[in-house]
Image: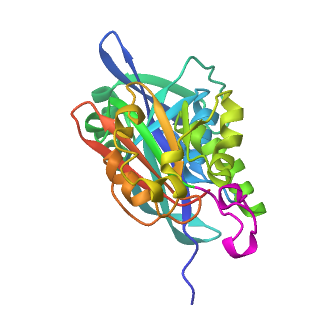
Amino acid sequence: MSNPATVIAAGGVVWRERRGTRQVLLVHRPRYDDWSLPKGKLTAHEHVLSAARREIEEETGLRVVLGPSLGIQRYDVRKNGGTVPKLVHYWSAETRGDGEFVSSDEVDRVEWLEVDQAAARLSYPRDVDILRNLEPAVPVVASLVLIRHAEAIRRKDWDEDDTDRPLTDRGRGTSERLVDVLAALGVDRVRSSDAERCATTLTPYAAAIGRKIHLHPEISERGFEADPQAMEGLAGTAWKHGHVTVICSHRPVLPALARELGLPVGKYSPGAFVVAHLLADGRVAHERFSAP
């Protein structure tokens, strides 16, 4: 007998600073008469980061930027007359501007509370555990997203200059889906190898936010092969206080580039990426994700 499909959901601890005090936002669900953290299930083919931001906005009316992970909840839920496992991913979620809450059958009230008050109000101990993870995860000084370009036409199927090798239809689909993912992370600086397949991976997002892609020949395959030391010093400009920078490069270049940026070295499939946050205490929190 096969295992039941796991329900995947995502949400966050929405927070703000008011007069030197941190507040978090809780939601009240009339169906259960409980107070909880905003969250919800992923739609078909939706990336978990996109889902977290969407669900928070739908339940609270607020636009947020996702920060470090605050953990994953695992518990069983009832579905179709049986019991299935559920995983809920949570991130720090900082407000960006004002929004308007609209009461619904799903969430009829929201309330900003100081952290200790929120811990006392929450209906489930598992939510309190997630809330307690907020303190060491914020504030964030700067953030980076390091990504391998989306799927490109194979070298053996391309007769022209390799720098001009384009994305496949699947790769272009990934680049379009990255728009919501990078928006959820609040990316506001766009950097790329000067190869077509890298720049095109980030083109839809750059267009969506009205930013120019800054090209770095030194992190292309050709540039790295010609001078592996040329990327030295890139970390000084990539980690920019108060900003979130995305950098797109190539599989052979990514290990050296990750080391230069102070990130873990690992394998990246096409469109896969790592998100890293420099915290105020000097620690770097990071997560790896598959392509959207």
Where residue 1 appears, as percent x and y from the top left, is: 57, 90
Residue at coordinates 74% horizontally, 69% vertically from top-left? 158
Q: Viewer-proximal residue, 30 or 278?
A: 278
Where residue 63 appears, as percent x and y from the top left, is: 58, 28
Instruction: Please tell me in which quadrant of the rendered image residue 284 appears.
Output: top left
Q: Quadrant of the C terminus?
A: bottom right
**Farthest-out residue, right:** 169
User: Is 285 inside the magenta-drawn segment?
Assistant: no
Would residue 35 appear left or right of 169 to someone viewing this image? left
Would residue 145 appear left or right of 113 to someone viewing this image? right
Instruction: Read off the magenta span.
Output: 149-167
Residue at coordinates 32% horizontally, 29% vertically from top-left? 139
Residue at coordinates 66% horizontally, 35% vertically from top-left? 206
- The secondary structure that dominates the magenta segment is loop
Instruction: Please tell me in which quadrant of the rendered image residue 173 appears.
Output: bottom right
Q: Viewer-proximal residue, 46 or 175?
A: 175
Q: Is residue 284 visible?
A: yes
**Farthest-out residue, left:** 281
Where residue 218 appears, as percent x and y from the top left, is: 48, 47
Where residue 144 appears, as percent x and y from the top left, is: 43, 41
